[in-house]
Amino acid sequence: MGKRLDLGNLWESFRFAFRALESRNFRLFFYAGLVSLMGTWIQNLALGWLVYRLTNSAFYLGLVGFAGQIPGLFLTPFAGVFADRLNRQQILKITQAVSMTAAFLMAILVFTDTITVTLILVIVIINGIALSFDTPFRHAFLLDMIGDKRLIPNAVALNSTLVNTARFLGPGIGGVLVALYGEAVCFLINGFSFMAMLIALMLMRVSVRKVQKKQTSLWHDLSEGFAFTWNFKPARSMIMLVMVTATFGLPFQSFLPVFARDILRGDSQLLGFLTGAVGAGALTGALYLATRPSVKPLPAIIRFSALTFSIGLLIFSWSVWPAFSVIVLYFSGFGMITQFSATNTLLQTVVDEDLRGRVLSFYSMSFIGFTPVGSLILGYIADQAGVSLTFTFAAGMLLTASLLFSRSFNSIRENLQLG
């Protein structure tokens, strides 16, 4: 009887952790997203390996990262305004189709051996424009899709779970595919993977959201969203921490080919293990958040995870042992994604619907828009001083930001009325 009871409790805990999957729309989004994002991470590994194979330059790795994400710095805030005005489901279909076309084009160019760094930059910029709209629309669409605000924290955590399941599995698969068949196959697989999300979006039954016709200008709506984000101290503190993390922390993923080949003396399969370790840690963090019954501990979780990421990056930057580097990246990945997912969850919980798209667009801009700036800066420094010294500096910046966030911790909890 005791054994049955334990199994029953285990099943109930499992159901609680995945409770957002009770929504048919979210189930479609979740499983299609797993397929699509698996393709994305396979392509990300292949793209980094391709660029480094063509150029042997850390700067070009940073430049490609910059080109792919810099559109987000300028376009994401405007996309947030449109996310409060337009049909989110229809726009997401368009952004997915654009990214699918970009992946197929990359595959053709690599298959025909006509690929150049210039063409890569053009394609990743186009894909970056699509991503600038896709991310804020996707975040804002979450409530439309589920229809129950109580499930939002779990849905955000499960969304991170699927992203990081793909981050964990995709790079390992990509590393093997690159070693056996070359980069073109990875781009081709990613192109086909987008079809899963397009089909899911077509099958979703979403109530048409009533949007009042705006009498105000685009600039007015944008400034209104910015004013709320800046004046609401918890949102400002969390987004500024994300901004620093995106600038000095997230770019390390673009430089993993350098660590894998030149410092750890490995090949594309080692690159897959390193990237997969980040994904495994991130997946653990996402599952951990999915089991949280309340948003009350989230500020403390943000503080702890930011410190974990900064310390992990500092240790990794000087590691010369592949196995140890994999372990350190596991904890770094845990800290990185837990900080971002907890921030997203809190913002989704406290922001009113009529401001949701705009506030979440500033959150999206913080990691999409500032990551490329960091990639370019750190890429230049890495070419001059080496990647180990460069990311020691980056980790120091993250640690400083984490400590500053800790100083305002009690004020944030009071403002959010979390006790």
Image (tube, rainbow, N blue to C red):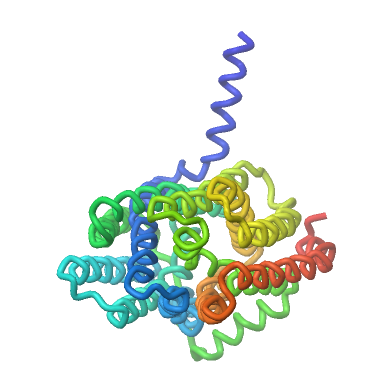
Q: Is residue 7 above or below residue 341?
A: above
Quadrant holding the C terminus? bottom right
Residue 85's x, y, as percent?
45, 77
Please count the marks in the image: 0
Give the side of residue 112 with respect to residue 178, left or right: left
Q: Is residue 59 visible?
A: yes
Q: Is residue 355 visible?
A: no
Residue at x 56%, y 70% (from the top left corner): 387
Residue at x 49%, y 85% (from the top left corner): 74
Q: Is residue 176 above or below residue 417?
A: above
Give the side of residue 389 with respect to residue 181, left or right: right
Residue 283's x, y, as percent?
53, 47
Q: Is residue 324 above or below residue 399?
A: above
Task: Give the image quarter of residue 292.
Answer: top right
Q: Is residue 16 above or below residue 185?
A: above
**In-front residue for pair 10/220:** 10
Quadrant holding the N terminus? top right
Residue at x 48%, y 63% (from the top left corner): 262
Give the side of residue 19 with respect to residue 401, left or right: left
Residue 32's x, y, as percent?
34, 51
| Extreme residue toward the left, this view | 112
**In-front residue for pair 244/392:** 392
Residue 371's x, y, as percent?
53, 74
**In-front residue for pair 407/342:** 407
Residue at x 17%, y 65% (from the top left corner): 111
